[in-house]
Image (spheres, helix red, strand yellow):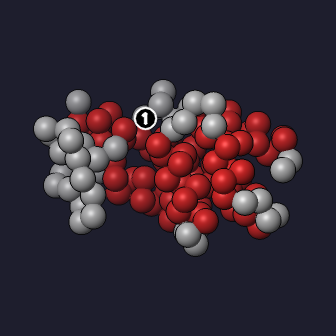
Amino acid sequence: MKKVIVVAALLIASTLQAAPVEKQCAALQKVADVVVLLKAQGAPEAEVHKELNGERPNTQVAQAIRAVYAGASAAQVKAECLADAAPGPLRPGRTSTDPNGAQSIGDVLVTH
């Protein structure tokens, strides 16, 4: 696996928690772009998880990796991130333990 690509993805992923939702989702799309490249190069999903999300696991990064390996594009990952962050009732297939119905870190940032 190309270390430069991995380092770039790690730097992008580190911005996920400290940015507004739109920037978080844009950063997640960039991480997904890297995952698409790594998948195209034949990198196994487990190795990508280990390299991009091993030291300080991030749920959004893990979901993005799984989504790309399941066939989603980077744009679909971003769209899903934005949809998850939208305030309002839970979308089908989503669960929440937050009393305000927050579905993701994006929702927490938007609703609180």
Of the residues shown, which amino acid type is indicated by label 1?
Pro
Q: Is residue 80 above or below residue 18?
A: below
Q: Which residue is mark 1?
A: 20
Mark 1 crowdedness (10 Å alpha carbons): few <14, some 14-19, many ≥20: few
Name of the residue lying farthest toward the bottom: 71
Q: As rendered, which of 57 and 83 lies closer to the eye? A: 57
| Residue 41, x across and y down, in percent | 82, 64
Residue 76 in the figure: left or right of residue 4: left
Residue at the image position 72 percent from the left and 60 percent from the top: 44
Residue 79: x percent and y percent?
45, 60
Q: Residue at x 68, y 36 (%)?
A: 10
Q: Residue furthest front?
A: 46
On screen, residue 10 above or below 76: above
Q: Position of residue 58 (x, y in %)?
A: 51, 38
The residue sitting at 13% across, 38% down in the picture is 99
Question: Residue at 69% across / 51% down in the picture?
Answer: 48
| Secondary structure state at the residue bearing disc 1 | loop
Would residue 10 be found to the left or right of residue 40 on screen?
left
Note whether residue 49 is visible: yes
